[in-house]
Image (tube, rainbow, N blue to C red):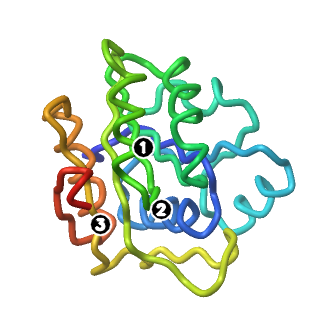
Amino acid sequence: MRPFNKVAIIGVGLIGGSIGLAVKKQKVAGEVVGIFRHGSTLKRALRCKAVDRGVLDMAEGVADADLIVICSPVHSIPALAWEAARFAKRGTVITDAGSTKSWIVSEMDRLFKGSPVRFVGSHPMAGSERTGVEAARFDLFKGSPCVVTKTARTDKTALSRVTGFWKLIGARVKVLDPAEH
């Protein structure tokens, strides 16, 4: 049985594309949907097989997702997470791939207080000298460290799902307080 029915990825470049490829290769989800701002990027991601389906509409993309992974520039993560949460089903878990954890997690704790959607911050420490979905690799996270954040407000089930997700796609997970990161 797959741990997730649907994983939605916001920002399908090197990191998001590699997540999509890894999820598909490891059969972590039944469907991988990419959410895009531009049709040209959507077409490139489909050509690279980084996602099963691509959409330009946030509501359509996150509908029925069990896990939403935001792989965008750090400054845009809180706004994208909040927008995604507006359309996500109860119990959906949102994580990110941003390198700055204290600011992101404190913003998310504030925004998601009382929300039926859960947020757990992540920072996979993998990459390449190349960029874009064309550089994505299914094994990018294999053996790479990934910090997953935990605060006093972190939902235990959501934390378990996020740490399990990163492990399934090959990362070595370490759970830390955002300030320790």
Near-viewer residue (3 or 39): 39
Q: Earlier in the sequence, mark 3 or mark 2?
A: 2
Q: Could you tell me which residue is drawn at 25 percent across and 54 percent down? A: 148
Q: Disc 1, disc 2: CB below 8 Å?
A: no
Q: Earlier in the sequence, mark 1 or mark 3?
A: 1
Residue at which label 3 appears: 146
Near-viewer residue (77 or 25): 77
Amino acid residing under circle 2: Ile
Q: Please identify, in this view, whether the residue under mark 3 or under mark 2 is nearer the observer.
A: 3
Q: Quadrant of residue 59?
A: top right
Residue at which label 2 appears: 19
Q: Residues within 10 Å of mark 1 (few under 14, many from 20)?
A: many
Amino acid residing under circle 3: Cys
**Element at label 1:** helix
Q: Could you tell me which residue is drawn at 42 percent across and 23 percent down? A: 111
Image spot of residue 62 (x, y percent)? 55, 30
Near-viewer residue (71 or 142): 71
**Element at label 3:** strand
Q: Please identify, in this view, whether the residue under mark 1 or under mark 3 is nearer the observer.
A: 1
Q: Residues within 10 Å of mark 3 (few under 14, many from 20)?
A: many
* Left or right of residue 177, residue 138 in this image: right
Q: Which mark is residue 104?
A: 1
Q: Residues within 10 Å of mark 2 (few under 14, many from 20)?
A: many
Q: Could you tell me which residue is drawn at 65 percent across and 83 percent down? A: 130
Q: CA distance from mark 3 to mark 2?
A: 13 Å
Q: CA distance from mark 1 to mark 3?
A: 16 Å
